[in-house]
């Protein structure tokens, strides 16, 4: 599996593994949140706020349509962590051109 995660238009964590599971997604997102100091926003008090409360942190996550990113467990975990998912269009690799190019180079090496 290839996984990358970033906020503020930069990649902050990467994981290369033979598995492709929602557990791997949580591991990499936890690492990315910690690396960028965003986990400080995710306090219990703020996460308990209503979903439409402007004080609740909503972090965007843009990803491909892979099974690990679209699984029920991943969606539930991201909703709990106030992370909004956005997936690229199916069969449109140009939506994630930089990421797909990087993965192509890594795969051939």
Image (cartoon, rainbow, N blue to C red):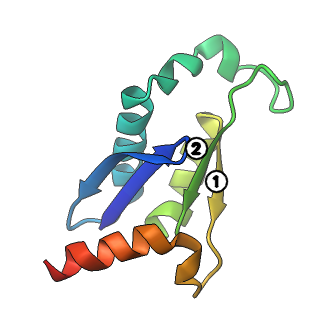
The quarter of the displayed image where residue 77 is located: top right
Q: Which residue was labeled with disc 2? A: 78
Q: Earlier in the sequence, mark 2 or mark 1?
A: 2
Residue appearing at x 66%, y 59% in the figure: 86
Residue appearing at x 51%, y 17% in the figure: 40
Q: Do the residues labelled 2 and 1 touch (CB within 8 Å)?
A: yes
Q: Which residue was labeled with disc 1? A: 85
**How many residues crowd around disc 2 within 10 Å: few (fewer than 14), some, or many (20 or more)?**
many
Q: Is 43 left, or right, of 2 in this rendering?
A: right
Q: Residue furthest bottom?
A: 91
Q: Which of 19 and 91 is in front in this view?
A: 91
Tell me where residue 53 appears, x and y as whole percent: 85, 24
Residue appearing at x 80%, y 32% in the figure: 51
**How many residues crowd around disc 1 within 10 Å: few (fewer than 14), some, or many (20 or more)?**
some
* Measured Cα–Cα span from mark 2 to mark 1: 8 Å
Q: Is 5 left, or right, of 75 in this rendering?
A: left
Tell me where residue 48 appears, x and y as whole percent: 71, 20
The quarter of the displayed image where residue 44 is located: top right
Q: Is 19 left, or right, of 12 in this rendering?
A: left
């Amino acid at each position: 599996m290839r996984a990358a995660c970033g906020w503020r238009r930069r990649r902050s964590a990467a994981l290369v593994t033979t598995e492709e599971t929602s557990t791997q997604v949580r591991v990499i997102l936890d690492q990315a949140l910690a690396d960028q100091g965003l986990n400080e926003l995710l306090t219990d008090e703020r996460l308990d706020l209503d979903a439409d409360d402007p004080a609740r942190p909503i972090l965007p996550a843009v990803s491909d349509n892979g099974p690990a990113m679209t699984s029920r467990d991943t969606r539930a975990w991201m909703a709990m962590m106030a992370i909004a998912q956005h997936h690229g269009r199916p069969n449109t690799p140009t939506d994630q051109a930089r990421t797909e190019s990087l993965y192509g180079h890594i795969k051939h090496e």
